[in-house]
Image (cartoon, rainbow, N blue to C red):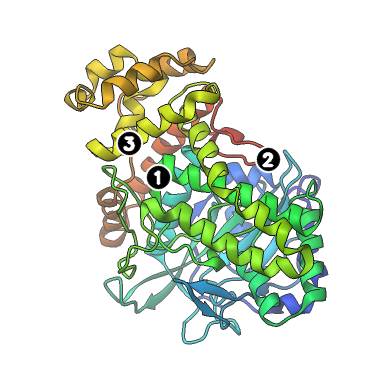
Amino acid sequence: MNPKTLRGERLHETLGDGFFDVVRPAEFPRAELRFRNDRWAARVGLDGLDDAEWIARFARFEPLPGSLPEPLALRYHGHQFRAYNPDLGDGRGFLYAQVRDLKDGRLLDLGTKGSGRTPWSRQGDGRLTLKGGVREILATEMLEALGVYTSKTFSLVETGEELIRGDEPSPTRSAVLVRLSHSHIRIGTFQRLAALERWDEMRRLVEYSIAQYWPDADGPAGLYDAVTGACARLGAEWFTAGFVHGVLNTDNVNITGESFDYGPWRFLDTFDPAFTAAYFDHSGLYCFARQPEALNWNLARLGECLIPIAGRAAIEQVFDGFAARFTSALTAQTLARLGLEPGPAGSTPLIEAFWAAMRQTAPPVQQSFHDLLGGALSERLRASPLGDVYGRAPWPDVIAGLRALAPAPGLAQALADAPAAPQTLVIGEVEAIWDAIDRDDDWSKLSAKIVAIRNTGAFHARLGLLAGPNGRPGACAVETA
């Protein structure tokens, strides 16, 4: 570790002990490093760790210099599938450390998953399956490559325990994961304080959130406005990535609008608005097309928490603008994925027609963005396996509209290095990667997939359109080679 570059922080402690419980990490029988995210380690000054030091920090959780002396299990409440639960909190994870992004100065959290029991574990064992960790690596890598503002899987260490799970063949292997996130303050963090009527602590949380994450926000209403805009953009980013998070409870939405906490996630194969990722989501509450609605519902719960200190009128004015902000973000993000410059004010109807065509013809999502890159260039369509699809209504009119828009300045250079086929991450690919690990301890397929995904991210970076506004670094914000 280079102490000249690491910048440890312990700011979450300043909120006071009513916001967390000091905990101890589990002691694991084994610690075998399976994944380390060196490109993001460099961004926070931890790339100098050798593997033994990495294990000491991210499996035994020896404190980072200048950061938290002991792990903190955070307290929060939340609505789970619209039912309020006051018995939540970090049940198998904790806030391990806070660091600074050396590129832009953001405060970032190193949080865990599978690090042992806490006061909030209830009946759980506080552990994570190795398969769950592998799936989180894949989700975060793919989302980052597609320009979604996501947490980063920072480390995965296999821990040598056998776990029993109802949704995996058991016994199954165990792991501890560390994620790098732009805040672990959730909507549920505010809900807990409102439920307990701790208004002084609510004001303290608002002040902290503004100071550390939204410094341009003006008071509680300004914070709510910033979070609402960030969540509207996140919904648009998921939509254009063809991604289904699966469990959009209020404790799974944070105040920076960063996607995190990946369980039963899926990427769409063919476009299907009703596709549901979680096998236990029987009503389709969190299906693909209802994700913006879910974010909006969760924002309503945040607004309820802030009304007593911000005023109803100010909160309702912001809340009423969510749909327009989502539509604007969806237009911008769709154009970005298509390699087109932000369109004129009248481009929203064209983008609405694009998504209507996707719904009507249900093509493979990633293949469609691959084919229509640059405004549906004729040579790309001739090479597409979906040529017959694009010949059917309403595609000809949509394609004509896309071709009338300006391509991104970096398109010509990017096309010279464009992959011959789109990068996908459908469930069969995920299972094949896991089967090789589970059956033969073969990690080569995972490694190869990460390289392929990062190459896709590098391709998008050359277009220069997917980084996101106002400090929302996506695929373009890091070196993706």
Judge from the rendering whether residue 179 lies leftward or rightward of residue 316; answer left or right. Answer: left
| 81 relative to 220, above or below | below
If you read the primary sequence from the N terminus, does the residue marked by circle 3 or circle 1 appear first? 3
Circle number at residue 291: none
Residue drawn at the location 34% of the way across and 77% of the way down = 165
Q: Nearer the viewer, mark 3 or mark 2?
A: 3
Q: Nearer the viewer, residue 358 or 270?
A: 358
Q: CA distance from mark 3 to mark 1?
A: 37 Å
Circle 1 residue = 447
| 164 relative to 114, above or below | below
Q: Nearer the viewer, residue 323 or 115?
A: 323
Query: Where residue 66 sits: x, y (%)?
Result: 81, 60
SS at mark 1? Answer: helix
Circle 2 residue = 471
Give yes or no for contact between labels 3 and 1 (Cβ–Cβ under 8 Å). no
Q: Identify residue type, mark 2.
A: Gly
Q: Which picture quadrant has residue 97?
A: bottom right
Query: Where residue 288 sits: x, y (%)?
Result: 37, 52
If you read the primary sequence from the N terminus, does the residue marked by circle 3 or circle 2 appear first? 3
Residue drawn at the location 53% of the way across and 57% of the way down = 296
Tell me if I can see residue 214 in this picture.
yes
Circle 3 residue = 356
Q: Identify residue type, mark 3.
A: Ala
